Every structure is written in structure tokens, then in C-alpha cells.
Amino acid sequence: MSDIYVKGWLMGVDEREHTDVHYRSLNGEGNFNWRLIFPFGYIPAENELVVSKKEHFWSLDKTEKRLPAVLCLQVWDNDLFSPDDFLGTLELPLTHMPQPAKKADKCTLEMMNTSSPNTKVINLFECKRTSGFWPFASQPGPDGELTGKLEAEMELLTKEEALERPAGKGQDEPNANPHLDKPKRPETSFFWFTSPFKTCKFIICKRFKCILITIICVFLAVLLLALFIYAIPQLLARKMVGV
């Protein structure tokens, strides 16, 4: 059972985006329907991002860096009282990324080997949009093991196009281009702290059903025995005086 969320960022950029949490995933599947937005500057002639930031907090001016356009996505297990557990990672070089699989069963780590002649690669800056499945791995590189699969749609817009087709982050307004419906999650997906009645129904009652029934039966038996013991002296006294 996991509380799953996905976070993403562009390599070299400090700002990070993340989905909401899919609580109590019983089979490891998370449903989000969540929009992650990554604004960035880009030099087409050099296929590089332009990142401006201060080297140190005491720096007065920002330093401009040029970095490869790599999208990093990670899936995590949300923990309330301890650090979140890392589940998998995915790194996609946007100018030379593996073409996504159209079906989940075709999504494997082998498709991430972009140097293989069997791997089809695309340039997101040329195709502008793509969708399908990509694999999450336990670690970057060839030694990683498959830990999950991500179904996603990616779209690249210029600044002018983004202004003409505004869209909010996540499911915030304006929820358009495209409109995102609420994810279809099972009734068991909820945050236990804010849903005490569901917690009682799905966690306490379901997991400890037999124990609760046993406790109730024992309690009733002890209660009846106590009432019986309490009533015996009165009954004996009445019989002795002939009442």
C-alpha cells in the first residue's frame, strides 16, 4: 500500500513541480490527471536551455548558464512521519528522447537505450507533442531496474502560444487546453487524517474486523456475567424471605 505522487523538474532548474498524492494505492497504481508546467528559455541553434540564477545567496547579479534540455521525473511514496520513499526515476533528453510506447506492456527499460539502432528517438522541439508510456527505473543508467511505468502527454509551446492558450497548473483555473477531469480513484484513496469516518471504515474495520468482533463478543459476555453476578444476591435474598 503506497501514497504515490510524481514530481518533475528541468535539469539545472531549481523550481520543481509535483502532482497531488494518490493515497492508499492498493496495487501500486496512481491516477493523477495533473498538469505540470515548466517555463524555460531555449536557444534552438545550440539545443540548450538558458538558466539564470544567483550562484550564492549573497550574489547581486544572476549568472547565465546553458544546459542540455533534460526533463527529470520521479515517483515517490509520501510518508507523513518520516522522509518520503524514492520509488523510481525517469530522465528524458528533450532533443533526443525515446519515442514512448503506445501500450503499457510494450514499455521496457530497453527503449531508454537511445544509442541502440532498435530505439526510435524523437526531438520534442520538432514534433511539439507526444504521448504514451515511459519506464521508471530504480536509478539512472544501465544498472537500473524497472520500478514502474508512466503514461503521460507532453506538449511544447512557445511563449506566444502559451499566452493564447492559457492553462493552470495541476487542475487549477483556467483548467483548459485541454480540460482535465478529476482522476478516477477508488473509494479507498483518501488522507486518513482528514477523513476519520473513512479511516474507521476502510482501515480499522477492514483490517481489524475479526479482532473487533472478538472484542465485542468478549465485552458482551463479560457484561452479561457481571449483571448475572450482580443479580444473584438479590434473587437469593428474595427466595430466603419468601418474596
Image (spheres, grey):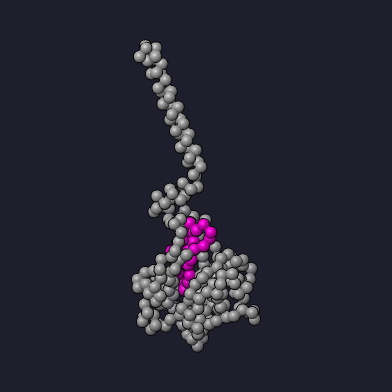
Q: Is residue 4 magenta?
A: yes
The residue located at (43%, 30%) in the rendering is 223
Determine if residue 57 is in view.
Answer: no
Residue extending farthest to the front is 242
- What count of labels does the image hold? 0
Q: Which percent across, then down, holds residue 34?
A: 43, 69
Quadrant of the snapshot with the C terminus: top left
The residue located at (40%, 22%) in the rendering is 231
The residue located at (43%, 65%) in the rendering is 183
| Numbered range of the magenta stretch | 3-30
| Location of residue 141 (image quadrant) | bottom right
In the picture shown, does residue 5 fall above or below 165? Answer: above
Depth check: give the residue in front, 125 or 187: 187
Residue extending farthest to the top is 241
Left of 234 or right of it: where is 97? right
The residue located at (43%, 49%) in the rendering is 201
Left of 121 or right of it: where is 128? left
In the picture shown, does residue 18 fall above or below 52? Answer: above
Q: Is residue 42 magenta?
A: no
Depth check: give the residue in front, 148 or 71: 148
Determine if residue 81 is in view.
Answer: yes
| Location of residue 181 (image quadrant) | bottom left
Q: Which percent across, then down, holds residue 133?
A: 54, 72
Q: Which percent across, then down, holds residue 206?
A: 48, 48
In the picture shown, does residue 116 fall above or below 183? Answer: below
Q: Which percent across, then down, holds residue 114?
A: 61, 78
In the picture shown, does residue 145 fall above or below 54? Answer: above
